[in-house]
Amino acid sequence: MGAPGPTGTPGPAGATGTTGTVEDGTLRVRLGALRELVGLSRTRLDERVLAEAGRVLDEAAARDRLPRAYTTVAIAGATGSGKSTLFNALAGAQLSEAGVRRPTTASPVSCTWEAGRGQSPDGLLERLGVPARARRRAHVLDPGLRGLILLDLPDYDSVDPAHREQVDRLLGLVDAVVWVVDPEKYADALLHERYLGAFAGHADVSLIVLNQADRLPPEAVDAVLDDLRRLLDERGVALGEHGEPGAWVLAGSALTGDGVGELRKLIGELVAARTAAARRLAADVDSVARRLEPVYVADGAQAPAGLTDEVREEFDDRLATAVGAPAAGLAAERGWLRRAD
């Protein structure tokens, strides 16, 4: 896709936009429907009701102006989870300060695997707010990670509110997330309620790593992984098992290197597909559509002022397109079958 039109809807495919995949085409249609829905609603609904939809449209337009040759992946975790050590292991160098005590800065650290000549990551790094002093280039030139921008985020449970605000801001911008948990805090309520539960719809662009598995006996690793999967299922997080789309869950140790190769492979597959940005935005549209649905189609809901039956029907059509009704139906069917099995 190229530069967005004045309405914020992505335009035709171009050098700095998407690669013209099926995901991009579907997303373009859904964003157009969401934009029309917002346009039809502005004079009838409180602007606060439409604020999240407007933000998603703005973010889609901003991401569309930047190269899809790069995929931004954030490593998020709590204090002491070992996420910075994992970041360094993937980068092949000591790029981010590791340890229980985190640096005082609230800024992320990035590592970039160049996508090729003429493909600069600077625009994306500026959008993410990564300061120049915190931008690194990969020391290990792994062709499987070409086009990756990896971010080490501040701790989401930091005592400094500025750190937590920075984490929340960046999680709203990146294409995919690697959630790092440890054997002691993998069931932390803050993680599951505020983050993993809220990102349940983004499971397709999420990886969950049980780090520091070397601290557990082998039989305990499987038990913790099973319990972690149970907690994720309770939060509605789909798991990428048996060929189904969803979050991958794996164990490893950044300190010993166990599991790092598998994680690098999974990230490489995500980057190579160049669809993470579109899938992330599609999940954002899903979230917005779910929040808006009761306003338009809930049984017994009072219609907004001036909302005639004809206009309401038009709203329904636009919302159905924005939510991706056929895709949602297939996802629901897959979920039902998975649980039945």
Image (cartoon, rainbow, N blue to C red):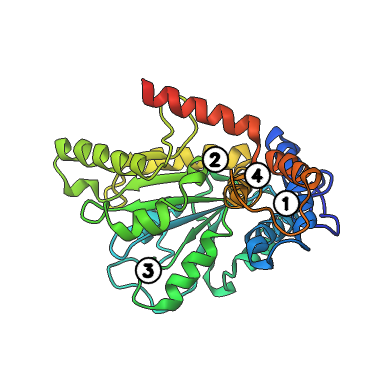
Mark 4 vs 1, N-terminal side: 1
Q: Nearer the viewer, mark 3 or mark 1?
A: 3
Seen from the viewer's position, the closer of residues 239 and 290 is 290
The label number, if any, that marks residue 270 in the structure image: 2
Residue 169 location, quadrant: bottom right
Which residue appears at 52% of the width and 70% of the height? 134
Which residue appears at 53% of the width and 30% of the height? 331
Q: Nearer the viewer, mark 2 or mark 4?
A: 4
Q: Secondary structure at mark 1?
A: loop
Mark 3 vs 1, N-terminal side: 3
Does residue 148 sit above or below 51 in this rendering? above
Q: Nearer the viewer, mark 4 or mark 1?
A: 4
Q: Secondary structure at mark 4?
A: helix
Q: Secondary structure at mark 2?
A: helix
Does residue 110 sit above or below 235 in this rendering? below
* Distance from the alpha carbon under mark 4 to that under mark 1: 23 Å
Residue named by callout 3 = 97
The label number, if any, that marks residue 117 in the structure image: 1
Q: Is residue 302 left or right of residue 257?
A: right
